[in-house]
Image: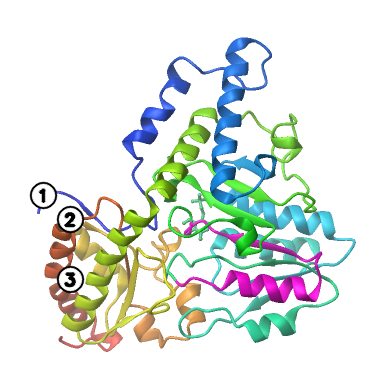
Amino acid sequence: MTELVYLDHAATTPVDPRVVEAMLPFFERRWGNPSSVYALGRGAKRALDDARDSMAEVLACKPNELVFTSCGTESDNLAIKGVAFARAARGKHLITSKIEHHAVLHTCEWLQKHFGFEVTYLEVDRQGLVDLGQLEAALRDDTVLVSIMYANNEIGTIEPLAEIARLVKGKRQDIVLHTDAVQAGGVLPLEVDRLGVDLLSLSGHKFYAPKGVGLLYARRGTPLLPQQQGGGQERGLRAGTENVPYIVGMAAALRLAYEEREARCAHMARLRDRLIEEISHSIPGSHLTGHPTQRLPNNASFVFEGADGESILLNLDQHGIAASSGSACSSGSLEISHVLRALRLRPELAQGSLRLSTGVKTTDVHVDHALAVLPGVVERVRARTPALGGRRA
Ligand code: PLP
Protein backbone atom coordinates (compact mmCIF):
# COMPACT_ATOMS: atom_id res chain seq x y z
CA MET A 1 0.00 0.00 0.00
CA THR A 2 1.54 3.35 -1.00
CA GLU A 3 -0.75 5.56 1.06
CA LEU A 4 0.12 6.09 4.75
CA VAL A 5 -2.12 4.05 7.03
CA TYR A 6 -2.44 6.41 9.96
CA LEU A 7 -3.72 4.62 13.06
CA ASP A 8 -2.47 7.06 15.67
CA HIS A 9 -5.30 9.57 16.05
CA ALA A 10 -4.91 9.50 19.84
CA ALA A 11 -1.49 11.13 19.30
CA THR A 12 -2.75 13.82 16.97
CA THR A 13 -5.22 14.33 14.13
CA PRO A 14 -4.88 16.05 10.74
CA VAL A 15 -6.48 19.49 10.51
CA ASP A 16 -9.92 19.30 8.88
CA PRO A 17 -9.86 21.35 5.61
CA ARG A 18 -13.03 23.14 6.79
CA VAL A 19 -11.11 24.21 9.88
CA VAL A 20 -8.25 25.54 7.74
CA GLU A 21 -10.85 27.45 5.74
CA ALA A 22 -12.29 29.01 8.90
CA MET A 23 -8.82 30.05 10.06
CA LEU A 24 -7.47 31.58 6.85
CA PRO A 25 -9.12 35.03 7.09
CA PHE A 26 -7.44 35.52 10.45
CA PHE A 27 -4.01 35.18 8.84
CA GLU A 28 -4.79 37.12 5.69
CA ARG A 29 -7.18 39.97 6.44
CA ARG A 30 -8.44 39.88 10.01
CA TRP A 31 -5.09 39.71 11.76
CA GLY A 32 -5.66 42.43 14.37
CA ASN A 33 -4.88 42.22 18.07
CA PRO A 34 -8.14 41.60 19.94
CA SER A 35 -7.09 44.13 22.60
CA SER A 36 -6.81 47.00 20.07
CA VAL A 37 -9.60 49.57 20.07
CA TYR A 38 -9.76 50.21 16.31
CA ALA A 39 -11.92 48.27 13.86
CA LEU A 40 -9.28 45.64 12.94
CA GLY A 41 -8.80 44.80 16.61
CA ARG A 42 -12.51 44.84 17.35
CA GLY A 43 -13.04 42.37 14.48
CA ALA A 44 -10.53 39.99 16.00
CA LYS A 45 -12.19 40.41 19.41
CA ARG A 46 -15.55 39.57 17.84
CA ALA A 47 -14.09 36.38 16.37
CA LEU A 48 -12.76 35.42 19.82
CA ASP A 49 -16.16 36.07 21.37
CA ASP A 50 -17.87 33.98 18.68
CA ALA A 51 -15.40 31.13 19.25
CA ARG A 52 -16.02 31.31 22.98
CA ASP A 53 -19.81 31.31 22.53
CA SER A 54 -19.64 28.36 20.17
CA MET A 55 -17.44 26.27 22.49
CA ALA A 56 -19.58 27.19 25.50
CA GLU A 57 -22.58 25.74 23.69
CA VAL A 58 -20.88 22.38 23.33
CA LEU A 59 -19.86 22.38 27.01
CA ALA A 60 -23.27 23.79 28.05
CA CYS A 61 -21.54 26.44 30.16
CA LYS A 62 -21.24 30.21 30.20
CA PRO A 63 -18.80 31.71 27.67
CA ASN A 64 -16.93 33.57 30.43
CA GLU A 65 -16.12 30.23 32.07
CA LEU A 66 -13.74 29.35 29.21
CA VAL A 67 -10.02 30.16 29.18
CA PHE A 68 -8.08 29.76 25.92
CA THR A 69 -4.62 28.23 26.38
CA SER A 70 -1.80 26.98 24.18
CA CYS A 71 -2.43 23.23 24.63
CA GLY A 72 -3.83 20.50 26.84
CA THR A 73 -0.67 20.48 28.93
CA GLU A 74 -1.06 24.17 29.74
CA SER A 75 -4.73 23.67 30.63
CA ASP A 76 -3.80 20.86 33.03
CA ASN A 77 -1.02 22.97 34.58
CA LEU A 78 -3.28 25.99 35.02
CA ALA A 79 -6.04 23.87 36.56
CA ILE A 80 -3.87 22.01 39.04
CA LYS A 81 -1.36 24.68 40.04
CA GLY A 82 -4.05 27.36 39.87
CA VAL A 83 -6.23 25.59 42.45
CA ALA A 84 -3.34 24.30 44.56
CA PHE A 85 -1.86 27.79 45.03
CA ALA A 86 -5.24 29.47 45.45
CA ARG A 87 -6.27 26.97 48.16
CA ALA A 88 -2.93 26.28 49.89
CA ALA A 89 -4.05 28.07 53.04
CA ARG A 90 -7.12 25.79 53.22
CA GLY A 91 -5.26 22.52 52.64
CA LYS A 92 -2.39 20.95 50.72
CA HIS A 93 -3.76 17.53 49.82
CA LEU A 94 -4.38 16.60 46.19
CA ILE A 95 -5.80 13.37 44.76
CA THR A 96 -5.18 12.02 41.28
CA SER A 97 -4.78 8.60 39.68
CA LYS A 98 -1.76 6.54 38.67
CA ILE A 99 -2.77 6.53 35.00
CA GLU A 100 -3.00 10.27 34.33
CA HIS A 101 -1.09 11.89 31.49
CA HIS A 102 2.30 13.32 32.49
CA ALA A 103 0.81 16.81 32.15
CA VAL A 104 -1.11 15.98 35.33
CA LEU A 105 1.29 13.59 37.07
CA HIS A 106 4.42 15.70 36.66
CA THR A 107 2.52 18.82 37.76
CA CYS A 108 1.40 17.05 40.94
CA GLU A 109 4.91 15.71 41.55
CA TRP A 110 6.34 19.22 41.11
CA LEU A 111 3.90 20.64 43.67
CA GLN A 112 4.88 17.81 46.00
CA LYS A 113 8.61 18.30 45.55
CA HIS A 114 8.84 22.07 45.62
CA PHE A 115 5.82 23.30 47.56
CA GLY A 116 5.09 20.65 50.17
CA PHE A 117 1.78 19.40 48.77
CA GLU A 118 0.75 15.84 49.61
CA VAL A 119 -0.57 13.79 46.71
CA THR A 120 -2.56 10.54 46.79
CA TYR A 121 -2.21 8.55 43.56
CA LEU A 122 -5.25 6.26 43.23
CA GLU A 123 -4.88 2.71 41.96
CA VAL A 124 -6.87 1.43 39.00
CA ASP A 125 -8.23 -2.08 38.39
CA ARG A 126 -6.93 -4.33 35.61
CA GLN A 127 -9.18 -2.61 33.09
CA GLY A 128 -8.04 0.85 34.09
CA LEU A 129 -11.02 1.99 36.16
CA VAL A 130 -10.17 4.18 39.14
CA ASP A 131 -10.79 2.52 42.51
CA LEU A 132 -13.78 4.46 43.86
CA GLY A 133 -13.51 2.88 47.32
CA GLN A 134 -9.96 4.14 47.53
CA LEU A 135 -11.06 7.58 46.36
CA GLU A 136 -13.71 7.77 49.07
CA ALA A 137 -11.20 6.70 51.71
CA ALA A 138 -8.59 9.16 50.44
CA LEU A 139 -10.79 12.28 50.73
CA ARG A 140 -9.60 14.27 53.75
CA ASP A 141 -10.40 17.49 55.52
CA ASP A 142 -7.41 19.15 53.87
CA THR A 143 -8.14 17.81 50.34
CA VAL A 144 -8.51 20.75 47.95
CA LEU A 145 -8.39 19.17 44.50
CA VAL A 146 -9.22 15.87 42.80
CA SER A 147 -7.98 15.43 39.24
CA ILE A 148 -9.15 12.33 37.34
CA MET A 149 -8.97 11.98 33.57
CA TYR A 150 -12.13 11.49 31.53
CA ALA A 151 -10.58 8.85 29.27
CA ASN A 152 -7.12 7.36 29.22
CA ASN A 153 -4.84 8.10 26.29
CA GLU A 154 -3.10 4.71 26.19
CA ILE A 155 -5.79 2.15 26.91
CA GLY A 156 -8.94 4.16 26.19
CA THR A 157 -10.76 3.41 29.45
CA ILE A 158 -13.50 5.94 30.26
CA GLU A 159 -13.64 6.84 33.95
CA PRO A 160 -17.00 7.17 35.75
CA LEU A 161 -16.79 10.95 36.21
CA ALA A 162 -20.36 11.51 37.41
CA GLU A 163 -19.84 8.90 40.13
CA ILE A 164 -16.52 10.46 41.04
CA ALA A 165 -18.19 13.89 41.26
CA ARG A 166 -20.87 12.45 43.55
CA LEU A 167 -18.25 11.07 45.94
CA VAL A 168 -16.08 14.20 45.92
CA LYS A 169 -18.92 16.69 46.35
CA GLY A 170 -20.58 14.38 48.89
CA LYS A 171 -17.50 14.81 51.02
CA ARG A 172 -17.29 18.59 50.65
CA GLN A 173 -18.72 20.97 48.04
CA ASP A 174 -15.55 23.07 48.01
CA ILE A 175 -13.22 20.29 46.88
CA VAL A 176 -12.45 21.21 43.27
CA LEU A 177 -12.88 18.45 40.67
CA HIS A 178 -10.72 18.69 37.55
CA THR A 179 -10.79 16.36 34.58
CA ASP A 180 -8.28 16.03 31.78
CA ALA A 181 -10.72 15.51 28.92
CA VAL A 182 -8.09 15.78 26.19
CA GLN A 183 -8.82 12.31 24.76
CA ALA A 184 -12.57 12.71 25.21
CA GLY A 185 -12.77 15.95 23.22
CA GLY A 186 -14.73 15.41 20.02
CA VAL A 187 -15.98 11.93 20.92
CA LEU A 188 -17.63 11.94 24.38
CA PRO A 189 -20.30 14.27 25.80
CA LEU A 190 -18.75 17.39 27.33
CA GLU A 191 -21.70 19.02 29.13
CA VAL A 192 -19.92 20.05 32.31
CA ASP A 193 -22.95 19.98 34.60
CA ARG A 194 -23.77 16.44 33.62
CA LEU A 195 -20.18 15.45 34.26
CA GLY A 196 -20.20 17.33 37.57
CA VAL A 197 -16.73 18.83 37.12
CA ASP A 198 -15.41 22.29 38.04
CA LEU A 199 -12.47 22.30 35.64
CA LEU A 200 -12.03 20.52 32.31
CA SER A 201 -9.04 20.52 29.94
CA LEU A 202 -9.22 20.15 26.15
CA SER A 203 -6.66 20.21 23.36
CA GLY A 204 -7.52 21.21 19.78
CA HIS A 205 -5.19 18.84 17.98
CA LYS A 206 -7.06 15.77 19.21
CA PHE A 207 -10.22 16.81 17.34
CA TYR A 208 -8.94 18.00 13.95
CA ALA A 209 -7.81 21.52 14.94
CA PRO A 210 -4.13 22.52 14.83
CA LYS A 211 -1.57 21.66 17.49
CA GLY A 212 -0.79 24.44 19.96
CA VAL A 213 -4.22 25.55 21.11
CA GLY A 214 -6.24 24.38 24.10
CA LEU A 215 -9.07 25.24 26.44
CA LEU A 216 -9.73 25.19 30.14
CA TYR A 217 -13.30 25.29 31.40
CA ALA A 218 -13.37 26.86 34.88
CA ARG A 219 -16.73 26.87 36.67
CA ARG A 220 -17.64 30.32 37.96
CA GLY A 221 -16.38 30.74 41.54
CA THR A 222 -13.65 28.09 41.27
CA PRO A 223 -10.56 29.34 43.12
CA LEU A 224 -7.86 29.65 40.46
CA LEU A 225 -4.62 31.64 40.44
CA PRO A 226 -3.18 32.51 37.02
CA GLN A 227 0.12 30.84 36.22
CA GLN A 228 1.52 33.57 34.02
CA GLN A 229 1.42 37.28 34.53
CA GLY A 230 1.21 40.03 31.94
CA GLY A 231 -1.71 41.69 30.14
CA GLY A 232 -5.16 41.01 31.52
CA GLN A 233 -6.30 38.65 28.74
CA GLU A 234 -8.72 35.84 29.49
CA ARG A 235 -10.14 37.63 32.53
CA GLY A 236 -6.64 37.79 33.98
CA LEU A 237 -6.35 33.99 34.04
CA ARG A 238 -4.04 33.60 31.09
CA ALA A 239 -1.97 36.60 30.09
CA GLY A 240 -0.69 36.80 26.52
CA THR A 241 -2.14 37.97 23.21
CA GLU A 242 -4.68 35.40 22.13
CA ASN A 243 -3.88 33.13 19.19
CA VAL A 244 -6.93 34.23 17.25
CA PRO A 245 -6.63 32.01 14.12
CA TYR A 246 -6.01 28.86 16.15
CA ILE A 247 -8.79 29.64 18.62
CA VAL A 248 -11.18 30.20 15.70
CA GLY A 249 -9.98 26.87 14.25
CA MET A 250 -10.44 25.04 17.55
CA ALA A 251 -13.99 26.37 17.92
CA ALA A 252 -14.85 25.37 14.33
CA ALA A 253 -13.36 21.91 14.87
CA LEU A 254 -15.25 21.34 18.12
CA ARG A 255 -18.52 22.44 16.56
CA LEU A 256 -18.04 20.11 13.57
CA ALA A 257 -17.05 17.25 15.88
CA TYR A 258 -20.27 17.59 17.89
CA GLU A 259 -22.53 18.18 14.87
CA GLU A 260 -21.12 15.02 13.31
CA ARG A 261 -20.38 13.11 16.50
CA GLU A 262 -22.86 10.27 16.08
CA ALA A 263 -21.74 9.36 12.58
CA ARG A 264 -18.04 9.86 13.36
CA CYS A 265 -18.16 7.72 16.48
CA ALA A 266 -20.13 4.95 14.78
CA HIS A 267 -17.56 4.89 11.96
CA MET A 268 -14.52 4.89 14.23
CA ALA A 269 -16.01 2.34 16.62
CA ARG A 270 -16.88 -0.07 13.81
CA LEU A 271 -13.30 -0.01 12.57
CA ARG A 272 -11.96 -0.22 16.14
CA ASP A 273 -14.12 -3.30 16.71
CA ARG A 274 -12.83 -4.92 13.54
CA LEU A 275 -9.28 -4.36 14.80
CA ILE A 276 -10.08 -5.72 18.25
CA GLU A 277 -11.95 -8.79 17.07
CA GLU A 278 -9.69 -9.75 14.22
CA ILE A 279 -6.41 -9.17 16.10
CA SER A 280 -7.68 -11.11 19.10
CA HIS A 281 -8.53 -14.05 16.82
CA SER A 282 -5.57 -14.00 14.47
CA ILE A 283 -2.69 -13.38 16.91
CA PRO A 284 -2.26 -15.91 19.71
CA GLY A 285 -0.94 -14.38 22.92
CA SER A 286 -2.63 -11.03 22.24
CA HIS A 287 -4.61 -9.33 24.99
CA LEU A 288 -6.82 -6.26 24.78
CA THR A 289 -5.82 -3.61 27.33
CA GLY A 290 -8.34 -1.25 28.90
CA HIS A 291 -12.03 -1.78 29.50
CA PRO A 292 -13.89 -4.03 27.02
CA THR A 293 -16.93 -1.72 26.75
CA GLN A 294 -16.25 1.51 28.67
CA ARG A 295 -13.63 2.62 26.18
CA LEU A 296 -13.07 5.39 23.66
CA PRO A 297 -14.71 4.65 20.30
CA ASN A 298 -11.39 4.98 18.49
CA ASN A 299 -9.02 3.06 20.75
CA ALA A 300 -7.81 -0.52 20.13
CA SER A 301 -4.91 -1.23 22.46
CA PHE A 302 -3.16 -4.51 23.00
CA VAL A 303 -0.25 -6.27 24.56
CA PHE A 304 1.41 -9.15 22.74
CA GLU A 305 3.15 -11.82 24.79
CA GLY A 306 6.87 -12.10 24.19
CA ALA A 307 7.15 -9.12 21.82
CA ASP A 308 8.61 -5.65 22.18
CA GLY A 309 6.39 -2.69 21.36
CA GLU A 310 9.10 -0.48 19.87
CA SER A 311 10.12 -3.19 17.39
CA ILE A 312 6.49 -3.73 16.43
CA LEU A 313 6.18 0.01 15.72
CA LEU A 314 9.31 0.12 13.59
CA ASN A 315 8.19 -2.90 11.59
CA LEU A 316 4.73 -1.42 11.08
CA ASP A 317 6.36 1.80 9.92
CA GLN A 318 8.21 -0.15 7.23
CA HIS A 319 4.80 -1.30 6.00
CA GLY A 320 3.50 2.28 5.96
CA ILE A 321 1.49 2.00 9.17
CA ALA A 322 1.73 4.69 11.87
CA ALA A 323 0.78 3.52 15.36
CA SER A 324 1.93 3.97 18.91
CA SER A 325 3.23 1.93 21.77
CA GLY A 326 1.84 3.30 24.98
CA SER A 327 1.55 7.08 24.93
CA ALA A 328 3.05 9.01 22.05
CA CYS A 329 4.52 11.43 24.56
CA SER A 330 6.55 8.69 26.26
CA SER A 331 7.47 6.55 23.25
CA GLY A 332 11.12 6.68 22.35
CA SER A 333 11.84 5.32 25.80
CA LEU A 334 11.79 1.54 26.15
CA GLU A 335 10.42 1.71 29.66
CA ILE A 336 7.07 0.18 30.41
CA SER A 337 4.63 3.06 30.61
CA HIS A 338 3.24 4.07 33.99
CA VAL A 339 -0.24 3.21 32.69
CA LEU A 340 0.64 -0.40 31.87
CA ARG A 341 2.47 -0.68 35.20
CA ALA A 342 -0.63 0.53 37.01
CA LEU A 343 -2.60 -2.30 35.34
CA ARG A 344 -0.17 -4.72 37.04
CA LEU A 345 0.56 -6.57 33.81
CA ARG A 346 3.48 -9.00 33.86
CA PRO A 347 6.54 -7.11 32.50
CA GLU A 348 7.01 -9.56 29.61
CA LEU A 349 3.44 -8.77 28.56
CA ALA A 350 3.60 -5.03 29.11
CA GLN A 351 6.72 -4.67 26.92
CA GLY A 352 4.71 -5.65 23.86
CA SER A 353 2.11 -2.90 23.86
CA LEU A 354 0.50 -1.45 20.76
CA ARG A 355 -2.12 1.27 20.46
CA LEU A 356 -4.08 1.58 17.22
CA SER A 357 -6.44 4.55 17.13
CA THR A 358 -8.89 5.12 14.30
CA GLY A 359 -10.07 8.45 12.91
CA VAL A 360 -12.75 9.97 10.71
CA LYS A 361 -10.78 9.27 7.53
CA THR A 362 -9.74 5.72 8.44
CA THR A 363 -11.16 3.22 5.95
CA ASP A 364 -11.77 -0.52 5.80
CA VAL A 365 -8.88 -0.72 3.33
CA HIS A 366 -6.55 0.78 5.99
CA VAL A 367 -7.79 -1.69 8.56
CA ASP A 368 -7.44 -4.59 6.06
CA HIS A 369 -3.82 -3.59 5.48
CA ALA A 370 -3.06 -3.41 9.21
CA LEU A 371 -4.75 -6.75 9.81
CA ALA A 372 -2.84 -8.35 6.95
CA VAL A 373 0.54 -7.07 8.15
CA LEU A 374 0.35 -7.25 11.94
CA PRO A 375 0.38 -11.05 12.55
CA GLY A 376 3.61 -11.44 10.55
CA VAL A 377 5.18 -8.44 12.26
CA VAL A 378 4.42 -9.79 15.73
CA GLU A 379 5.73 -13.22 14.73
CA ARG A 380 8.99 -11.77 13.42
CA VAL A 381 9.49 -9.56 16.47
CA ARG A 382 8.84 -12.49 18.80
CA ALA A 383 11.36 -14.65 16.96
CA ARG A 384 13.97 -11.89 17.35
CA THR A 385 13.35 -11.23 21.03
CA PRO A 386 13.65 -14.60 22.77
CA ALA A 387 14.73 -12.75 25.94
CA LEU A 388 11.12 -11.67 26.33
CA GLY A 389 9.96 -15.28 26.12
CA GLY A 390 9.49 -14.84 22.37
CA ARG A 391 7.41 -17.59 20.83
CA ARG A 392 6.32 -18.32 17.35
CA ALA A 393 2.70 -17.56 16.71
N1 PLP B 1 -3.69 14.83 28.43
C1 PLP B 1 -3.91 13.74 27.70
C2 PLP B 1 -4.81 12.66 28.21
C3 PLP B 1 -3.28 13.59 26.45
O1 PLP B 1 -3.48 12.49 25.72
C4 PLP B 1 -2.41 14.62 26.00
C5 PLP B 1 -1.68 14.48 24.72
O2 PLP B 1 -1.42 13.42 24.25
C6 PLP B 1 -2.25 15.77 26.81
C7 PLP B 1 -2.91 15.83 28.02
C8 PLP B 1 -1.38 16.90 26.38
O3 PLP B 1 -2.03 17.66 25.40
P1 PLP B 1 -1.15 18.66 24.46
O4 PLP B 1 -0.43 17.77 23.51
O5 PLP B 1 -2.14 19.53 23.80
O6 PLP B 1 -0.25 19.40 25.38
**Residue 211: image x %, image y %?**
45, 42
Q: Earlier in the sequence, mark 1 or mark 3?
A: 1
Q: On screen, 357 above or below 250? A: below
Residues in magenta, as a range: 157-184
Please say whether residue 160 is visible from this viewpoint: yes
Q: Earlier in the sequence, mark 2 or mark 1?
A: 1
Element under disc 2:
loop
Disc 2 to disc 1, how far (Cα)? 7 Å
Q: Residue at x 45, y 37 (%)?
A: 252
Q: Dot 1, how many residues are within 10 Å of its Cα: few (below 14), some (14-19), or many (20+)?
A: few
Residue under pointer 3: 374
Residue under pointer 1: 2
In this view, the residue in front, 300 or 3, is 300
Q: Quadrant of the N terminus?
A: bottom left
Disc 3 to disc 2, how far (Cα)? 12 Å
The reply to whether dot 2 and dot 1 touch (C-beta < 8 Å) is yes
Q: On screen, 144 above or below 86? A: below
**Residue 348: image x %, image y %?**
35, 85
Q: Dot 3, how many residues are within 10 Å of its Cα: few (below 14), some (14-19), or many (20+)?
A: some
Q: On screen, 4 above or below 106? A: above
Q: On screen, 182 above or below 252? A: below
Please say whether residue 323 is visible from this viewpoint: no
The answer to whether 154 appears left or right of 159 in the picture is: left
Q: Earlier in the sequence, mark 3 or mark 2?
A: 2
* Residue 222 sits inside the magenta stretch: no
Residue 190 — which label? none
Residue under pointer 2: 320
Instruction: For ligand 1, tell me if the residue under mark 2 lies within 8 Å.
Output: no
